[in-house]
Amino acid sequence: MSAVAETGHKGEVVLAARNVAKSYGSVHALKGVNFDIHRGQVTTLFGENGAGKSTLMKILSGVVTPTSGEIILDGEPVSFASSSQARDRGISIIHQELSLAPNMNVRDNIFMGREIMMATGVDFAEEERQTRLLMAELEEDIDPLTPVEDLRLGQQQIVEIARALSVNSRILIMDEPTSALSASEVEVLFKVIRDLTNRGVSIVYISHHLEEALQITNHAVVLRDGAMTAYAERKDIDLEWIVRHMVGDNFDLGSPPTGYDKGEVSLSIEGLTVPDPGGAGYAVVDDLSLAVRAGEIVCIYGLMGAGRTELLETVAGRLKATAGRVLLKGRDVTGQTIAQCIRDGLVLVPEDRQRDGLVQTMTVGRNLSLANIGAFTRGLFTSAARELDLVGDAIRKVHIKTDGGGAAIGSLSGGNQQKVVIGKMLATDPEVILLDEPSRGIDIGAKAEVFKLLAERARQGLAVVYTTSEVGECLSIAHRIIVMRRGRISAEFGPDATKEQIMAASGEAVHAH
Amino acid sequence: MSVTPAIDTKAATRGGKRKKSFVELLFEGRAFFALIAIVVVFSLMSPNYFTVSNFLIMASHVAIFGLLAIGMLLVILNGGIDLSVGSTLGLAGVVAGFLMQGVALPQIGFILYPSVWVVVVLTCLLGAVVGAVNGVLIAYLRVPAFVATLGVLYVARGIALLMTNGLTYNNLGGRPELGNTGFDWLGFNRLAGIPIGVLVLFVFAIACHILLTRTAFGRWLYASGGNERAAELSGVPVKRVKISVYVLSGICAAVAGLVLSSQLTSAGPTAGTTYELTAIAAVVIGGAALTGGRGTVIGTMLGAFVIGFLSDGLVIIGVSAYWQTVFTGAVIVTAVLLNSIKYGRR
């Protein structure tokens, strides 16, 4: 039951891909990739969306078989017919979306589908004992009988890892394991990863969060358009190097637009206080004041739970404040509905585009026109021709790569879907746009395009407020950087701040909780 | 609008020009082809089936649950379900019958005989009130649609039974000297040879089609059915939309109740029992997704006609009523199967 087979030396190659290629019809998702996974070390796959990371992962974990090339495990070629065959050989994968049953407890989740049986049924006592052992190995104080839904996301991630270890995994593939974690939970995860590698488990790590991945990885594999563009050890590379190989040239998320005069104050938040929506009694936004001028770009940085999302949602009319005012061009808009706010020119691009941003059953065009139906309605009826103009205009302005407005929303890449959500709101011709984590889950090329777009609109007088949890994104187009901590503004910087200053103000350096 | 009943209205914007293979075409228009197949098969089996008079008779049967299905489509597009329509239909018939008997006002010793138009308006208003109750329960009090409308199903049926003490109003003709004749006009009269009930169905269908495809409300409905949170954040008044669809569904049920009691010239408290299921079946056969956001009026109409023409055809060729039930069930399951293949591919 102990998690790891203690054979071989650290650093030796356990799994290797040789000329692995995968084609779907005429689409070459992967074009001959070569790399090694070393025992007890972390290998990170870098690449934009669509670069072939997930295809490669699926091949390694036996979900799909490669069109050509081979996978070499412990020096001999293998081919997996299914993911359970791969798991039997010690290769497990932890997907981005956790596959736990939230209503069941930790023990039952870990042994789901391979319960330990005895004559009278499931041997819960033995399962519980093994679960405790696993948790002790991972140094996590999680009771086996706790329902998974009561755990924090980071702890749920640990349970996933425990499940993978319980089947004797020697190679663990982690797809974006930190995307839902807070900074302190990321620390815990990294500690677990270090423990695992010390015991000889090899980790294949995938993340959009480049800085974070650099902290933990030993080797870097960079993919672009299905081909491997670079492969190096950690000591030889830096962030610049990865980004350069990911996108093909030197990359830059932009700089604050200059050369124009900012206008009057567009958005003014005065003493805003918002109670916890869960009813916990404390204020998630605590007596916060902020003024944003026309043409100004403000970045709000903060950890998860700092109150960024609640602040934006309250300003945009979704949540109710208990105190304070929101003024739009000097007019009080506190307590207005979302629809009224949109009409007045105050719009929000939500954080989770799948859940809050897009209507999956509608086309690209109808998503784009959704917030602006009034613009192509005359009397009672909508005008198809006017809508077509409006949609075409939006697609051009935000540079959406699509077959046209009639395309299904699911046919777009993540970055283009995000542009649809932003384009939908920009189509209403707002005065103020609030964007909650606009770069979440989109690749660096799309990120840069989004920021460029926002900078252009700011130049035309739009007030832009965006939040982020990546420090690098604060130091791009923002004129001002606001750091939020526990519902309050803890610091304010200009564009010349350093990453260390910003992170210190957010409380990130102190891992108190 | 071409015959693509089973699919969201993607024709409106660019990108729909791609040529479709024959199989795809067959699949997209499955409800239409099913209807053609039903007509052809029964016409071959019975000489009485393929006649104008039979089609008109069948169509006036379809009118009843076709009207219910239109209201149901709106609710299902919103991602809800309205189980109360059959009871609302029955209650509407009973209330109409009650009003036609004359309303006694003992305080002033006078019996009021409202004219037929007043009865029609009051009955529709009743349907709207029942729908509004559903809507408020679901949108504001957050009762799941299934439970709220199930409750209203019982309450409405119970009120209908209480009002009549379980009996049926047989005299709906009115009397000329009281000025309240003409109730049977809805059920018996014809315009250009077509029964009024069928015309009412088509007027409702066309109005609903325009509502869905050409108005802001239609767009709100598709959006909030597809993703309510996204719709709300885009400024769609999702609660108002939700209440509206239940109100419209209630009105459709009330109109169906008027047409039915007029066709039968009687109003019984048990009329329309289980009709809500037929209406749901028509919507589903028409390709709408029960999860909301997908479906069209044309599809729903085809679905209603498939069910109506199938069951009447089985009667004409003399198949037992029990087999009719089996066939209808098989058609519904097949339709859902095809829908899940279609939507599952995305």
Image (spheres, helix red, strand yellow):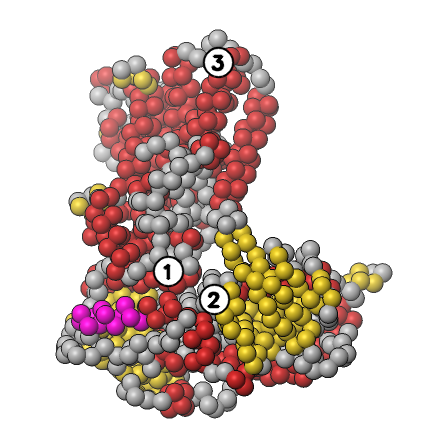
Crowd class of label 2 (few under 14; some 14 to 19; many from 20; radius 10 Å): many
Residue A196, percent from left and from top? 66, 80
Asked if residue A460 is among those painted magenta in the image, a careful observer would answer: yes
Give B237 or A2, whichever is nearer the viewer: A2
Q: Secondary structure at mark 3?
A: helix
The disc, 1 or 2, on the residue closer to the chain's N-terminal end is 2
Where in the figure is residue B90, as x and y percent of width and height? 42, 32
Chain under numbered label 1: A
Q: Chain of mark 3?
A: B
Rendering coords of residue A373 (x, y %): 25, 52
Q: Is residue A275 left or right of residue B310?
A: left
- Assess whether mark 3 and mark 2 are in contact (beta carbons under 8 angstroms): no
Look at the numbered disc 2 and give the secondary structure of its residue: strand
Residue type marked 2: Arg
Q: Amino acid at mark 3?
A: Ser
State the CA–CA distance, disc 2 to disc 3: 62 Å
Per the image, the residue denoted by label 3 is B43
Task: Using the rendered image, report if marks 2 and 3 lie on a common chain.
Answer: no
Say if A342 sits above or below B342 in the image.
below
Q: Quadrant of residue A458?
A: bottom left
Please tell me whether mark 1 sits on a helix, a strand or a loop. helix
Mark sitting on residue A224: 2
Front position among marks 2 and 3: 2
The structure residue drawn at horizontal position 22% and vertical position 80%, both measured from the top left corner, is A291
Q: Main secondary structure of the magenta part?
A: helix
